[in-house]
Amino acid sequence: MAVDDGRIPGTCFIKPNPPALGAQVCNGAVRPWESLGFAVVGRLPGAFRHHRPGFVDALVMFKTLAR
């Protein structure tokens, strides 16, 4: 956790990814992150192994913390 003038500008946590399908990339859903102001800034074609459609694109999402 970072602290800036006594405020917390951002946090992250690290946890194990689920085993097997998708284990090679991080987890999470797009809509909740977009609702928090994150935007898709990149795409990794076929990088995520989904249990139904198979390999799908993984999205790189970003939100600036600069004032």
Image (cartoon, rainbow, N blue to C red):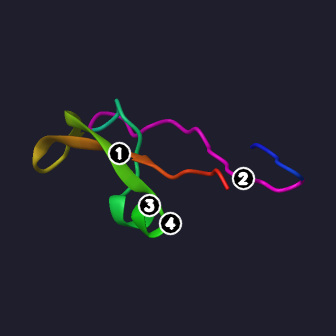
At mark 4, the secondary structure is: loop
Residues at marks 1 and 2 touching, judged by CB atoms closer than 8 Å: no
Alpha carbons under labels 3 and 4: distance apart:
5 Å
Indicate which disc, 2 or 4, sits on the residue closer to the N terminus.
2
Residue 30, image x, y percentages? 34, 59
Query: In which quadrant of the rendered image does the N terminus lie?
Result: top right
User: Where residue 56 sits in the image (x, y, percent)?
Assistant: 16, 42
Q: Which mark is residue 33?
A: 3
Identify residue for label 2: 9
Is 28 left, or right, of 53 in this rendering? Answer: right
The image quarter in which residue 42 lies: top left
Tell me where the magenta segment starts and ends, as one range: 6-21
Residues tagged 3 and 4 counted as in contact (Cβ below 8 A) = yes
Label 1 with label 3: CB-CB less than 8 Å: no
- Badge 2 amino acid: Pro
Q: Is residue 42 left or right of residue 7?
A: left
| Quadrant location of the C terminus in the rendered image | bottom right
In front of the other: 16 or 41: 41
| Residue tagged 4 | 36
**Distance in Å between CA atoms under marks 2 and 4:** 14 Å
The residue that mark 1 highlights is 41
Query: With respect to residue 13, does 67 lie above or below?
Result: below
Q: Secondary structure at mark 1?
A: strand
The amino acid type, in three-letter code, at marker 4 is Leu
Ranked by sequence position, the earlier of labels 1 and 4 is 4
**Amino acid type at mark 3:** Trp
Q: CA distance from mark 1 to mark 3?
A: 13 Å
Q: Residue furthest bottom?
A: 35
Quadrant of res 50: top left
- Residue 55: give x, y in percent of width and height: 14, 38
- Residue type at mark 1: give it: Val
